[in-house]
Amino acid sequence: MKKQLNLFLFCLILITPAFAQQPIQWKFPTAGGIHGAPAVTDKVVYFGSNDMNLYALDKATGKQLWKYPTAGAIRSTPAVTAGKVLFNSADGNIYAVDKTKGKLLWTFKTGGEQQYDIWDYYLSSPVAEGNTLYAGSGDSSVYAIDIESGKLRWKFKTGGVVHASPVVHNGKVFIGSYDGHFYVLDAQSGSLIWKFKTLGDPAFPKGEVQRAAHVDDEQVIFGSRDFYIYSLNTKTGEQKWNMKEKGSWVIATPTLYKGNLFVGTSDTHQFYSLNAETGKVNWIMPLNMRVYATAMIVENKLVFGCFNGRVYFADPETGKVIKTFQTDESKKNHALVYDDTDHIRKDFDMYGDNYLQAEKHILSLGSILSGPVATDGMLYFGDANGHFYALNTREYLRP
Protein backbone atom coordinates (compact mmCIF):
# COMPACT_ATOMS: atom_id res chain seq x y z
CA MET A 1 0.00 0.00 0.00
CA LYS A 2 2.84 2.37 0.89
CA LYS A 3 4.54 1.69 -2.45
CA GLN A 4 1.30 2.42 -4.30
CA LEU A 5 0.89 5.71 -2.41
CA ASN A 6 4.45 6.77 -3.17
CA LEU A 7 3.94 5.95 -6.84
CA PHE A 8 0.74 8.02 -6.89
CA LEU A 9 2.48 11.02 -5.29
CA PHE A 10 5.40 10.74 -7.72
CA CYS A 11 3.03 10.77 -10.71
CA LEU A 12 1.13 13.72 -9.21
CA ILE A 13 4.36 15.71 -8.90
CA LEU A 14 5.17 15.01 -12.53
CA ILE A 15 1.85 16.26 -13.86
CA THR A 16 1.24 19.20 -11.48
CA PRO A 17 3.23 21.85 -13.42
CA ALA A 18 1.14 21.25 -16.53
CA PHE A 19 -2.10 21.86 -14.67
CA ALA A 20 -1.05 24.49 -12.14
CA GLN A 21 1.04 27.04 -13.94
CA GLN A 22 1.38 30.28 -12.02
CA PRO A 23 -0.38 33.19 -13.77
CA ILE A 24 2.59 35.46 -12.97
CA GLN A 25 5.11 34.39 -15.59
CA TRP A 26 7.76 36.61 -14.05
CA LYS A 27 8.17 39.72 -11.91
CA PHE A 28 11.05 42.21 -12.11
CA PRO A 29 11.97 44.76 -9.40
CA THR A 30 13.24 48.29 -10.01
CA ALA A 31 14.18 50.95 -7.47
CA GLY A 32 11.44 53.42 -8.41
CA GLY A 33 7.80 53.62 -9.39
CA ILE A 34 6.80 52.71 -12.93
CA HIS A 35 4.38 55.27 -14.40
CA GLY A 36 4.57 54.66 -18.14
CA ALA A 37 3.35 51.71 -20.17
CA PRO A 38 5.97 49.43 -21.71
CA ALA A 39 6.91 49.06 -25.35
CA VAL A 40 6.79 45.39 -26.28
CA THR A 41 8.53 43.88 -29.32
CA ASP A 42 8.88 40.28 -30.49
CA LYS A 43 11.47 39.38 -27.86
CA VAL A 44 12.04 42.40 -25.63
CA VAL A 45 10.07 44.59 -23.21
CA TYR A 46 11.26 48.19 -22.76
CA PHE A 47 10.10 50.50 -19.97
CA GLY A 48 11.27 53.36 -17.79
CA SER A 49 11.29 53.81 -14.02
CA ASN A 50 11.43 56.60 -11.47
CA ASP A 51 14.85 55.18 -10.56
CA MET A 52 15.99 57.06 -13.70
CA ASN A 53 16.79 53.96 -15.76
CA LEU A 54 15.37 52.62 -18.99
CA TYR A 55 15.17 48.82 -18.87
CA ALA A 56 15.27 46.17 -21.57
CA LEU A 57 14.07 42.75 -20.40
CA ASP A 58 13.78 39.41 -22.13
CA LYS A 59 10.09 39.09 -22.91
CA ALA A 60 9.90 35.38 -22.09
CA THR A 61 11.97 35.24 -18.90
CA GLY A 62 12.14 38.76 -17.46
CA LYS A 63 15.93 38.63 -17.46
CA GLN A 64 17.55 42.05 -17.71
CA LEU A 65 19.32 42.50 -21.04
CA TRP A 66 20.54 46.03 -20.32
CA LYS A 67 19.59 49.29 -18.67
CA TYR A 68 20.41 52.86 -19.58
CA PRO A 69 20.80 55.47 -16.79
CA THR A 70 19.64 59.08 -17.07
CA ALA A 71 19.55 61.96 -14.60
CA GLY A 72 15.76 62.03 -14.21
CA ALA A 73 12.70 59.86 -13.74
CA ILE A 74 11.43 58.16 -16.91
CA ARG A 75 7.65 58.49 -16.72
CA SER A 76 6.82 57.87 -20.36
CA THR A 77 6.40 55.00 -22.79
CA PRO A 78 9.39 54.52 -25.11
CA ALA A 79 9.09 54.38 -28.89
CA VAL A 80 10.95 51.59 -30.69
CA THR A 81 11.83 52.10 -34.34
CA ALA A 82 14.76 51.92 -36.79
CA GLY A 83 16.90 49.96 -34.35
CA LYS A 84 16.45 52.60 -31.67
CA VAL A 85 14.62 53.06 -28.40
CA LEU A 86 13.53 56.69 -27.96
CA PHE A 87 12.27 58.08 -24.69
CA ASN A 88 11.68 61.17 -22.58
CA SER A 89 13.34 61.78 -19.21
CA ALA A 90 12.59 64.26 -16.43
CA ASP A 91 16.18 65.49 -16.78
CA GLY A 92 14.94 67.50 -19.78
CA ASN A 93 16.45 65.29 -22.48
CA ILE A 94 15.01 63.02 -25.13
CA TYR A 95 17.25 60.00 -25.68
CA ALA A 96 17.92 57.59 -28.52
CA VAL A 97 19.72 54.37 -27.58
CA ASP A 98 20.55 51.25 -29.56
CA LYS A 99 17.74 48.76 -28.94
CA THR A 100 20.07 45.76 -28.77
CA LYS A 101 22.86 46.99 -26.51
CA GLY A 102 21.46 50.14 -24.92
CA LYS A 103 24.31 52.26 -26.25
CA LEU A 104 23.61 55.99 -26.48
CA LEU A 105 23.12 57.24 -30.05
CA TRP A 106 22.04 60.83 -29.40
CA THR A 107 20.34 63.16 -26.95
CA PHE A 108 18.09 66.11 -27.65
CA LYS A 109 17.96 68.81 -24.99
CA THR A 110 14.58 70.46 -24.47
CA GLY A 111 14.00 73.68 -22.55
CA GLY A 112 13.70 71.65 -19.35
CA GLU A 113 11.11 69.61 -17.47
CA GLN A 114 8.79 70.46 -14.60
CA GLN A 115 6.07 68.68 -12.68
CA TYR A 116 2.78 70.61 -12.72
CA ASP A 117 1.58 69.14 -9.40
CA ILE A 118 1.78 65.83 -7.55
CA TRP A 119 -0.93 64.32 -9.76
CA ASP A 120 1.08 65.11 -12.89
CA TYR A 121 2.34 61.54 -13.08
CA TYR A 122 3.53 61.39 -16.67
CA LEU A 123 5.89 62.79 -19.24
CA SER A 124 4.90 62.99 -22.88
CA SER A 125 5.57 59.66 -24.60
CA PRO A 126 7.42 60.18 -27.90
CA VAL A 127 5.74 58.91 -31.07
CA ALA A 128 7.73 57.90 -34.15
CA GLU A 129 6.22 58.46 -37.59
CA GLY A 130 8.43 57.90 -40.61
CA ASN A 131 11.80 59.47 -39.85
CA THR A 132 10.43 61.97 -37.33
CA LEU A 133 9.91 61.75 -33.58
CA TYR A 134 7.19 63.86 -31.97
CA ALA A 135 7.04 64.66 -28.25
CA GLY A 136 5.78 67.23 -25.78
CA SER A 137 7.79 68.79 -22.97
CA GLY A 138 7.44 70.49 -19.61
CA ASP A 139 8.86 73.62 -21.28
CA SER A 140 5.40 74.06 -22.93
CA SER A 141 6.61 73.00 -26.38
CA VAL A 142 5.89 70.27 -28.90
CA TYR A 143 8.98 69.02 -30.72
CA ALA A 144 9.59 67.27 -34.03
CA ILE A 145 13.03 65.64 -34.13
CA ASP A 146 14.90 63.79 -36.88
CA ILE A 147 15.16 60.18 -35.71
CA GLU A 148 18.53 59.49 -37.34
CA SER A 149 20.42 62.60 -36.28
CA GLY A 150 18.52 63.89 -33.25
CA LYS A 151 18.32 67.33 -34.86
CA LEU A 152 15.33 69.63 -34.45
CA ARG A 153 12.88 69.78 -37.36
CA TRP A 154 10.42 72.17 -35.77
CA LYS A 155 9.10 73.39 -32.43
CA PHE A 156 5.62 74.63 -31.49
CA LYS A 157 5.07 76.65 -28.31
CA THR A 158 1.89 76.28 -26.23
CA GLY A 159 0.87 78.17 -23.11
CA GLY A 160 1.44 75.36 -20.62
CA VAL A 161 3.20 72.13 -19.75
CA VAL A 162 2.81 69.49 -22.48
CA HIS A 163 2.82 66.08 -20.84
CA ALA A 164 0.08 64.65 -23.02
CA SER A 165 1.41 62.24 -25.62
CA PRO A 166 0.99 63.13 -29.29
CA VAL A 167 -1.10 61.19 -31.76
CA VAL A 168 -0.01 61.35 -35.41
CA HIS A 169 -2.86 60.78 -37.86
CA ASN A 170 -3.11 61.58 -41.58
CA GLY A 171 -0.17 63.96 -41.56
CA LYS A 172 -1.29 65.83 -38.46
CA VAL A 173 -0.13 65.90 -34.84
CA PHE A 174 -2.90 65.91 -32.22
CA ILE A 175 -1.88 66.94 -28.71
CA GLY A 176 -3.26 68.65 -25.60
CA SER A 177 -1.62 71.03 -23.15
CA TYR A 178 -1.98 72.09 -19.55
CA ASP A 179 -2.97 75.51 -20.91
CA GLY A 180 -6.42 73.99 -21.56
CA HIS A 181 -6.11 73.90 -25.35
CA PHE A 182 -6.08 70.95 -27.69
CA TYR A 183 -3.86 71.52 -30.73
CA VAL A 184 -3.69 70.06 -34.21
CA LEU A 185 -0.44 70.76 -36.06
CA ASP A 186 0.88 70.01 -39.52
CA ALA A 187 3.28 67.10 -39.03
CA GLN A 188 5.75 68.40 -41.63
CA SER A 189 5.93 72.07 -40.70
CA GLY A 190 4.52 72.34 -37.19
CA SER A 191 2.09 75.04 -38.28
CA LEU A 192 -1.22 75.29 -36.43
CA ILE A 193 -4.24 73.82 -38.23
CA TRP A 194 -6.79 74.32 -35.46
CA LYS A 195 -7.05 74.49 -31.68
CA PHE A 196 -9.88 73.95 -29.22
CA LYS A 197 -10.28 75.56 -25.79
CA THR A 198 -11.79 73.42 -23.04
CA LEU A 199 -14.73 74.88 -21.15
CA GLY A 200 -13.10 75.05 -17.75
CA ASP A 201 -14.79 74.77 -14.38
CA PRO A 202 -14.78 77.20 -11.43
CA ALA A 203 -12.62 74.71 -9.53
CA PHE A 204 -10.27 74.13 -12.49
CA PRO A 205 -10.74 77.04 -14.89
CA LYS A 206 -7.86 76.13 -17.21
CA GLY A 207 -9.32 72.73 -18.10
CA GLU A 208 -5.89 71.13 -18.39
CA VAL A 209 -5.43 68.25 -20.85
CA GLN A 210 -3.09 65.73 -19.23
CA ARG A 211 -3.01 62.61 -21.42
CA ALA A 212 -3.36 61.55 -25.05
CA ALA A 213 -6.56 61.66 -27.09
CA HIS A 214 -8.26 58.95 -29.09
CA VAL A 215 -8.08 60.02 -32.74
CA ASP A 216 -9.73 58.52 -35.81
CA ASP A 217 -10.99 59.88 -39.13
CA GLU A 218 -14.19 61.22 -37.59
CA GLN A 219 -13.51 62.13 -33.96
CA VAL A 220 -10.94 63.39 -31.51
CA ILE A 221 -11.92 62.32 -27.99
CA PHE A 222 -10.14 63.29 -24.78
CA GLY A 223 -10.71 64.10 -21.13
CA SER A 224 -9.76 67.17 -19.12
CA ARG A 225 -9.31 68.38 -15.58
CA ASP A 226 -12.44 70.53 -15.99
CA PHE A 227 -14.55 67.35 -15.48
CA TYR A 228 -15.47 66.98 -19.19
CA ILE A 229 -14.95 64.39 -21.89
CA TYR A 230 -14.93 66.04 -25.32
CA SER A 231 -15.64 64.75 -28.80
CA LEU A 232 -14.45 67.01 -31.63
CA ASN A 233 -14.65 66.83 -35.40
CA THR A 234 -11.23 65.61 -36.54
CA LYS A 235 -11.04 67.93 -39.54
CA THR A 236 -12.46 71.15 -38.09
CA GLY A 237 -12.11 70.93 -34.31
CA GLU A 238 -15.80 71.71 -33.85
CA GLN A 239 -17.35 70.11 -30.80
CA LYS A 240 -19.65 67.17 -31.49
CA TRP A 241 -20.58 66.44 -27.88
CA ASN A 242 -19.31 66.60 -24.34
CA MET A 243 -20.14 64.82 -21.11
CA LYS A 244 -19.50 66.31 -17.69
CA GLU A 245 -18.39 63.98 -14.91
CA LYS A 246 -19.29 66.27 -12.03
CA GLY A 247 -16.60 66.45 -9.39
CA SER A 248 -13.93 64.49 -11.22
CA TRP A 249 -11.07 64.97 -13.62
CA VAL A 250 -11.03 62.70 -16.64
CA ILE A 251 -7.37 61.89 -17.25
CA ALA A 252 -7.23 58.52 -19.02
CA THR A 253 -7.14 58.20 -22.80
CA PRO A 254 -10.51 56.82 -23.98
CA THR A 255 -10.49 53.44 -25.72
CA LEU A 256 -12.81 52.81 -28.70
CA TYR A 257 -14.25 49.32 -29.24
CA LYS A 258 -17.30 48.35 -31.31
CA GLY A 259 -18.66 51.89 -31.37
CA ASN A 260 -18.28 52.45 -27.64
CA LEU A 261 -15.79 54.40 -25.55
CA PHE A 262 -14.27 53.05 -22.37
CA VAL A 263 -12.68 55.40 -19.85
CA GLY A 264 -12.12 55.69 -16.11
CA THR A 265 -12.51 58.75 -13.90
CA SER A 266 -10.39 60.27 -11.17
CA ASP A 267 -12.24 61.43 -8.07
CA THR A 268 -15.64 59.82 -8.63
CA HIS A 269 -13.90 56.42 -8.89
CA GLN A 270 -16.00 55.12 -11.77
CA PHE A 271 -15.45 53.45 -15.10
CA TYR A 272 -17.69 54.34 -18.06
CA SER A 273 -18.89 52.85 -21.29
CA LEU A 274 -20.20 55.60 -23.59
CA ASN A 275 -21.71 55.59 -27.05
CA ALA A 276 -18.94 57.09 -29.18
CA GLU A 277 -21.32 58.95 -31.49
CA THR A 278 -23.49 60.58 -28.85
CA GLY A 279 -21.67 60.38 -25.52
CA LYS A 280 -24.68 58.62 -24.02
CA VAL A 281 -23.86 56.39 -21.05
CA ASN A 282 -24.14 52.64 -21.66
CA TRP A 283 -23.09 51.54 -18.18
CA ILE A 284 -21.09 52.67 -15.16
CA MET A 285 -18.81 50.44 -13.10
CA PRO A 286 -18.26 51.66 -9.52
CA LEU A 287 -14.69 51.39 -8.20
CA ASN A 288 -12.94 52.38 -4.99
CA MET A 289 -10.09 54.44 -6.47
CA ARG A 290 -9.15 56.56 -9.47
CA VAL A 291 -8.22 55.34 -12.96
CA TYR A 292 -5.64 57.18 -15.09
CA ALA A 293 -4.59 54.15 -17.13
CA THR A 294 -5.81 53.53 -20.67
CA ALA A 295 -8.00 50.45 -21.05
CA MET A 296 -7.56 47.83 -23.73
CA ILE A 297 -9.47 44.87 -25.10
CA VAL A 298 -7.83 41.49 -24.51
CA GLU A 299 -9.50 38.34 -25.84
CA ASN A 300 -12.87 40.15 -25.94
CA LYS A 301 -12.47 41.38 -22.38
CA LEU A 302 -12.06 44.92 -21.12
CA VAL A 303 -8.80 45.27 -19.17
CA PHE A 304 -7.55 48.28 -17.21
CA GLY A 305 -5.36 49.15 -14.24
CA CYS A 306 -6.37 51.18 -11.20
CA PHE A 307 -4.67 53.19 -8.45
CA ASN A 308 -5.86 50.55 -5.96
CA GLY A 309 -3.20 48.17 -7.29
CA ARG A 310 -5.60 46.00 -9.25
CA VAL A 311 -6.06 45.03 -12.88
CA TYR A 312 -9.71 44.56 -13.81
CA PHE A 313 -11.03 42.11 -16.39
CA ALA A 314 -14.63 42.92 -17.35
CA ASP A 315 -17.31 42.24 -19.94
CA PRO A 316 -17.30 45.26 -22.30
CA GLU A 317 -20.99 44.76 -23.07
CA THR A 318 -22.25 44.91 -19.49
CA GLY A 319 -19.40 46.18 -17.32
CA LYS A 320 -19.60 43.06 -15.16
CA VAL A 321 -16.25 42.33 -13.52
CA ILE A 322 -15.02 38.86 -14.42
CA LYS A 323 -11.82 38.81 -12.42
CA THR A 324 -9.26 41.12 -10.80
CA PHE A 325 -5.52 40.76 -10.33
CA GLN A 326 -4.20 42.37 -7.16
CA THR A 327 -0.57 43.28 -6.55
CA ASP A 328 1.12 41.96 -3.43
CA GLU A 329 1.50 45.52 -2.12
CA SER A 330 -2.21 46.16 -2.59
CA LYS A 331 -2.92 43.22 -0.29
CA LYS A 332 -0.18 44.13 2.20
CA ASN A 333 -1.02 47.84 2.49
CA HIS A 334 -4.77 47.60 2.02
CA ALA A 335 -5.55 48.76 5.56
CA LEU A 336 -3.70 52.05 5.04
CA VAL A 337 -6.48 53.20 2.72
CA TYR A 338 -9.44 50.82 3.01
CA ASP A 339 -11.62 49.30 5.69
CA ASP A 340 -12.64 45.65 5.95
CA THR A 341 -15.45 46.16 3.41
CA ASP A 342 -13.00 47.45 0.75
CA HIS A 343 -14.32 51.00 1.03
CA ILE A 344 -12.06 53.99 1.66
CA ARG A 345 -11.62 54.47 5.39
CA LYS A 346 -13.72 57.25 6.89
CA ASP A 347 -10.62 58.75 8.51
CA PHE A 348 -8.62 58.69 5.25
CA ASP A 349 -8.56 62.29 3.98
CA MET A 350 -7.33 62.08 0.42
CA TYR A 351 -7.15 65.82 -0.26
CA GLY A 352 -6.82 67.34 3.21
CA ASP A 353 -3.86 68.99 4.91
CA ASN A 354 -1.90 65.73 4.77
CA TYR A 355 -2.63 65.06 1.10
CA LEU A 356 1.04 64.32 0.34
CA GLN A 357 1.09 61.51 2.90
CA ALA A 358 -2.28 60.28 1.67
CA GLU A 359 -0.96 60.08 -1.88
CA LYS A 360 2.04 58.07 -0.69
CA HIS A 361 -0.32 55.62 0.99
CA ILE A 362 -2.32 55.27 -2.23
CA LEU A 363 0.81 54.65 -4.30
CA SER A 364 1.99 52.09 -1.74
CA LEU A 365 -0.88 49.90 -2.95
CA GLY A 366 1.15 49.25 -6.10
CA SER A 367 -0.97 51.64 -8.15
CA ILE A 368 -1.14 50.80 -11.84
CA LEU A 369 -0.85 54.12 -13.64
CA SER A 370 -0.53 53.00 -17.27
CA GLY A 371 -1.27 50.14 -19.59
CA PRO A 372 -1.32 47.21 -19.38
CA VAL A 373 -0.02 46.05 -22.77
CA ALA A 374 -1.14 42.67 -24.10
CA THR A 375 0.57 40.40 -26.61
CA ASP A 376 0.81 36.65 -27.21
CA GLY A 377 -1.41 35.71 -24.29
CA MET A 378 0.58 37.83 -21.85
CA LEU A 379 -0.12 41.09 -20.05
CA TYR A 380 2.79 43.43 -19.27
CA PHE A 381 2.57 46.30 -16.77
CA GLY A 382 4.39 48.07 -13.97
CA ASP A 383 3.25 49.43 -10.63
CA ALA A 384 4.01 52.49 -8.52
CA ASN A 385 6.19 50.44 -6.17
CA GLY A 386 8.61 49.65 -8.97
CA HIS A 387 7.61 46.11 -9.85
CA PHE A 388 7.11 45.02 -13.44
CA TYR A 389 4.82 42.07 -14.17
CA ALA A 390 4.32 39.55 -16.94
CA LEU A 391 0.91 37.98 -16.34
CA ASN A 392 -0.25 34.92 -18.27
CA THR A 393 -3.79 36.02 -19.08
CA ARG A 394 -4.90 32.68 -20.48
CA GLU A 395 -3.91 30.94 -17.27
CA TYR A 396 -5.31 33.70 -15.11
CA LEU A 397 -8.67 33.77 -16.88
CA ARG A 398 -9.01 30.00 -17.04
CA PRO A 399 -12.28 28.99 -15.29
Image (tube, rainbow, N blue to C red):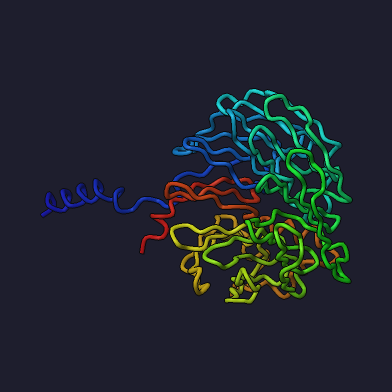
Q: 118 or 150: nearer the eye?
A: 150
Residue 234 found in image quarter: bottom right
Percent position (x, y) of residue 161? Answer: 84, 49
Viewer can see residue 367: no
Image height of 136 relative to 325, above or below: above
- Residue 38 as seen in the image, left or right of residue 198: left
The residue that appears at 72% across and 67% down in the rendered structure is: 229
Viewer can see residue 163: yes
- Residue 194 as seen in the image, left or right of residue 125: right
Quadrant location of the N terminus?
A: bottom left
Image height of 138 relative to 295, above or below: above
Quadrant location of the C terminus?
A: bottom left
Q: 197 or 364: nearer the eye?
A: 197
The residue that appears at 59% across and 71% down in the rendered structure is: 273
Image height of 166 relative to 198, above or below: above
Percent position (x, y) of residue 366? Answer: 62, 54
Percent position (x, y) of residue 259? Answer: 55, 67
The residue that appears at 73% across and 66% down in the rendered structure is: 230
Image height of 191 relative to 63, above or below: below
Percent position (x, y) of residue 92? Answer: 80, 36
The residue that appears at 76% across and 60% down in the rendered structure is: 237
